[in-house]
Image (cartoon, helix red, strand yellow):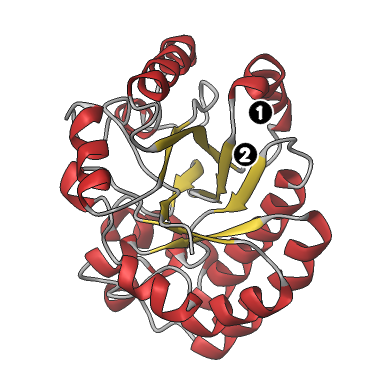
Amino acid sequence: MLKWDGHNHTKYCYHGSDAEQELYIERAIELGFQRYTITEHSPIPQGWLDDRELFSEMAMPLEQLPEYIDFLKRIKQQYDGKIEITAGLEMDYLQGRQDFTNSMLSQWQHELEDVVYSVHYLPGKGGMRSVDFTVADFTANIVEYYGTMEKVVNEYYDHVEQAIIEAGTLPMRKRIGHINLIEKFASELPSIDSAQINDRIKRLLPLLLEHQVGVDVNTAGMRVVTCGKAYVPPWFIILCKDAGVECVYGSDAHKPEQVGFGWDYFAQHMG
């Protein structure tokens, strides 16, 4: 099995670390990784979030994207022969704004080898809200908006399904990001019905197959006290593996020391 960390961030992430990329990659080499994918958050449209401070933290500005692409080329060249670096983005499913996504991709898709397509936002109080910002924000602006966690969960997975369909149109290698992100704050939220979650996840499998989209087996939830588990359950990894859906481990590292976190979880269930 190729030892590949397929979901990692950079100093271009303004809610992460400003550490230089070499620290991340040297850590990957030290841990024996053969491939390392850089997938920084792609820009989001102006006005997407009402909170200006949060907007500035969530993704790089659109005008910085050319600099990021040049950065990827430099890093690939720098580590040629030492570890395979693949150029990517973590792109957002932007409900109703596929025009923004298409415009960005029309210019840069030929520079990208990997895309992690993720759902970070749901409609909520006052507009689009982040599902992984804080417990207080999630409670006030998402739970109170929908009224029950059952409705929140269904809205989230409706978005994930649409994200898979959109991702299927992309020409590069693509996978759906952290499918259980909705459980990031689970221990501090009203009870989430595990049967509902499992049913909605199971329904993703035929869509993944139809649209030829892989799965980001994201271990970041294991680092989060209010979650305590990977964002893809073991039984779904096995279902995907048996069905021929590509599963790619992702540490979702926002700091160098997080590279490779949870690899054993992935290897155990893929073995």
Q: CA distance from mark 2 to mark 1?
A: 8 Å
Depicted 45 relative to depicted 224: above or below:
above
Q: Is residue 216 left or right of residue 35?
A: right
Residue that label 1 marks: 101
Q: Position of residue 181 (x, y in %)?
A: 44, 62
Please tell me which residue lies in front, 79 or 120: 79
- x and y, in percent, of residue 42 in the image: 49, 29
Rendered location of residue 174, percent (x, y)? 64, 46
Residue 86 vertical placement versus 116 (above, below): above
- Closer to the camera: disc 2 or disc 1? 1
- At x 37%, y 34%, the residue is 58
Residue under label 2, please give it. 94
- Which amino acid type corresponds to the residue marked 2 in the rendered image? Leu
Q: Specify the amino acid type for callout 1.
A: Thr
State which quadrant residue 9 falls in: top left
Q: Secondary structure at mark 2?
A: loop
Q: Are marks 2 and 1 in contact (CB under 8 Å)?
A: yes
- Kindly identify the residue that appears in the image at 32 percent across and 25 percent down: 12
Q: Position of residue 14 (x, y in %)?
A: 28, 29
Crowd around label 2: few <14 · some 14–19 · many ≥20 (10 Å)? many
